[in-house]
Image (spheres, helix red, strand yellow):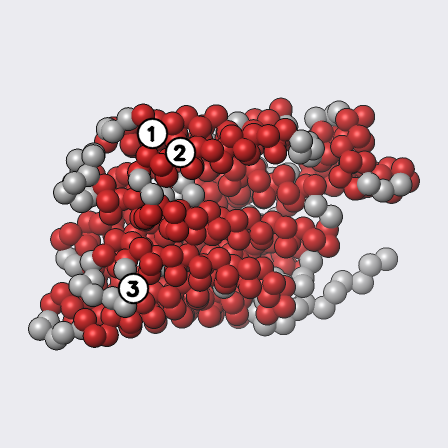
Amino acid sequence: MAYGWSAPVMVRLLSNNSDIYMTEDEGSWVIASIEIGDIFTPIPAGFISDKFGRKPMIFSIVPLYIIGWCLLITTRSYTILILVRLILGMAMGIIYTICPLYLGEIAEPDIRGKIISFCIVMWYFGILLSYSIAPYVSYENFSYICVSLPVILAFGLYFIPESPYNLILRGRYEQAMKELKEIRNGSDTFIVNEMKSIKAAIHQDSVEKMPCSALVTDPICRMSLFLFFIITVTGFFGGLTVMYAYATEIFSSVESTLFSADECTIVLGLIYLILSVLATLIVDNLGRRPLLMISAGGSGLSHLVAGIYFFLEKKTAFNVSDYSWILLLATGGYCVFASVGLAPITQVYQSEIFPNGIKGIASGIFTLAMCLLSVTALKMFQIVNSNLGIYYSFWFFTFINISGCILMYIYLIETNGKSLAEIQDELSLLSKSPKNKPDINQTLPLKTET
C-alpha cells in the first residue's frame, strides 16, 4: 500500500488546491524517494537477521510503518513527505529482503516455490487497495487506514515461529527443535531427520561459500550476473515501477477516457493482481524463458501503441478522444504481459542461476540494482515528460523491452525442472564460447550418481 499510495494521491497533491505545495519535479522526488529508502536496509537486514533472527527483523517494520503513516497524518510539509517516503522505503527494503528468505526456510520443498511467489500476489493486492481506497477518502483518512494495518500486523507477527534454519545457524538447537515441531506437526523421527538435513545444508553452504570478488572473477558468476542484468534492466527501464507509481497521472493527462483516471487505475490494479495469481500457477509448467520473452515482447508492443496514441494527441490535430479505449487497452495489455513474466519471474530466475556459495551476495546486489534502476526510471519519466513529451518515454520503454526480448532469445537459458548442477553446467558452456552454447530449450542429461 505504501508503494501504491503515490499513484492516486500525488495527482491530488500536485493540484492547485493541494495542502502541500510542490512542483512536478518535487513531486517526482516524492515518488522516487521510497526507492531511495529501500537502498539502505536490505544488506544490513540480512546481516542483522543472521545474528538475531528473522522474526525480530520482520517485526522491526512495524514501528517504521507506524511512524511513517503517523507523520503523514500530523504534518503538511514537503520535507516531511520526503522523510516519510524514505522511512516507508526502509521498511519495504527489510520485508522485501527477509520475507522471501523466511518463507523459504520454513516452507516444505514441494510448496516452497508457490509460497514465495505468493509474496508478489500480496504486493499487487496492497497496490490495488491503495488504488481503490485513496480516490474516495480524504488524504488524512487514507493515512488512518494505512496506519491501522501495521498495528494489526504487530499482533499477527507475535505468534509466528522463528526460522528453525536460522536458529540452527546460530547454534540454538533446542529452540530449533521446538519451532520445527510447531511448524511441521510431525513425528519425532521426522523432526530429527529434518534437523539433520538442515545442518547438512548449512555445512554445505559454508563449504561452497565464495568471496565477493567471484562475481567478476568467476566466469559462471559473470554470466549469471549478465543474465540477471538483462532481465532487471528490461523490467525496470521498460516501465515496470513507472506504471505502478504514475498510473493515475498517465490517465489524467488524457483529455477523455471511457472511465475516470482513478477507475482506469483500479482496472490496472485488478489486472496486476489476477495475472500475478495466474503466473504463480503456470511458472512451473511453461518455463521461465518463454514467459520472460513473451512478457518483454508484449510489453514493448503495448508501449509502442501507447506512445503512438500520446503522440497523436499531443503533437497532431487528430482528435483521439473517441479512441481513448486504445490507451486503456495498451496500458492494460502492458499490465497483462508484465504480470506473467517480468514482474513475478525475475526473482525466481535470480534465485536459480547464481551458485549457492554466492547467492547471499548476489541477492544483496539484486535488491540494490532494482532500487537504483527504479529510482532512475521514476525520476527520468518526469524529466522526459516535462522536456520532450510523454510519448518519448513510452517509445523508450518500447526500445528497452524489444531489445531485452532479443537478448533473452540469444542468451537466456531455461532453468525450469533443472537441478542447480545442470544449470551451472549450462552457464559454464555459455560463458566459454558462443560455439559451445548449450541448446537453451533442452535439459542437459542427468549425471549418473554412484
In contact (CB < 8 Å): disc 2 and disc 3: no
Looking at the picture, how far across and down is residue 71, in whole percent? 34, 27
- Give the residue drawn at x 67%, y 50%: 112
Name the residue type under label 3.
Answer: Phe
- Give the residue drawn at x 19%, y 49%: 383
Name the residue type under label 2.
Answer: Tyr
Q: Is residue 192 left or right of residue 110?
A: right
Task: Give the CA separation, mark 2 to mark 3.
Answer: 28 Å
Task: Give the CA separation, mark 2 to mark 1.
Answer: 7 Å
Does dot 2 land on a helix, a strand or a loop? helix
The earlier-in-sequence mark between 1 and 3 is 1
- Residue 78: in sight, yes or no? yes
Query: Where does label 3 land, which residue?
Result: 259
Find the residue positioned furthest to the left: 317
Query: Where does label 1 land, which residue?
Result: 73
Query: Where does label 2 land, which residue?
Result: 144
Looking at the picture, how far across and down is residue 102, in whole percent? 63, 39
Does dot 3 land on a helix, a strand or a loop? loop
Looking at the picture, how far across and down is residue 342, in whole percent? 46, 59
- Residue 224: in sight, yes or no? no
